[in-house]
Image: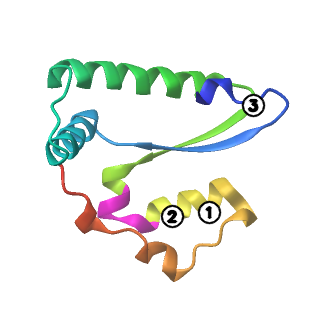
Amino acid sequence: MLPSLPRPHRYKIIYMVRPTAQVVDSQWVMLDRQGQKARSEKKHLIEVQEAHSKHIREVLRTSDRVDLLEVSYPDLVSNPDPIIQQLVEFLGDRFEACESVSRCVKPQLFRNR
């Protein structure tokens, strides 16, 4: 739906990029906890989601209405300070990088690697 954002506005979008296999693994764990099974093979889901993510990012990069910042999820979790600095530069005075921002990053939640 990102490419369909209303026309008269400009947008700053922060797109979190995580290795697709990790996303699918996480989804499989979630489904398993709910007693459900995936409807497709894991390899197929990875391919479809990776293609979709690449397509969306390309559309956003080429849009004249979007400023895009792509953030690596593994980089954020392993070393948040450089990513937070990127956010400061990207968002300007709309974002203040105080100590509580770094504390929001919880590496223990990065379970499916």
Q: Position of residue 111 (x, y in %)?
A: 19, 56
Q: In the image, is 31 to the left or to the right of 78?
A: left
Q: Which amino acid type is shown beneath numbered disc 2?
A: Ile
* Residue indicated by mark 3: 65
Q: Which amino acid type is shown beneath numbered disc 3?
A: Arg
Query: What SS does tag 1 mark?
Result: helix
* Residue indicated by mark 1: 88
Q: Give the alpha-carbon distance from disc 1 to disc 2, as whole Å.
A: 6 Å
The region drawn magenta spans 76-81
Q: Is the residue 64 above or below the residue 92 in the image?
A: above
* Residue indicated by mark 2: 84
Q: Is the residue 39 above or below the residue 107 in the image?
A: above
Query: Are the residues tagged 1 and 3 within 8 Å (C-beta)?
Result: no
Q: Is the residue 19 above or below the residue 43 in the image?
A: below
**Hey, which quadrant is residue 18 in on the image?**
top left
The residue lying toward the viewer, choosing from 32 and 99, is: 32
Farthest right residue in view: 8
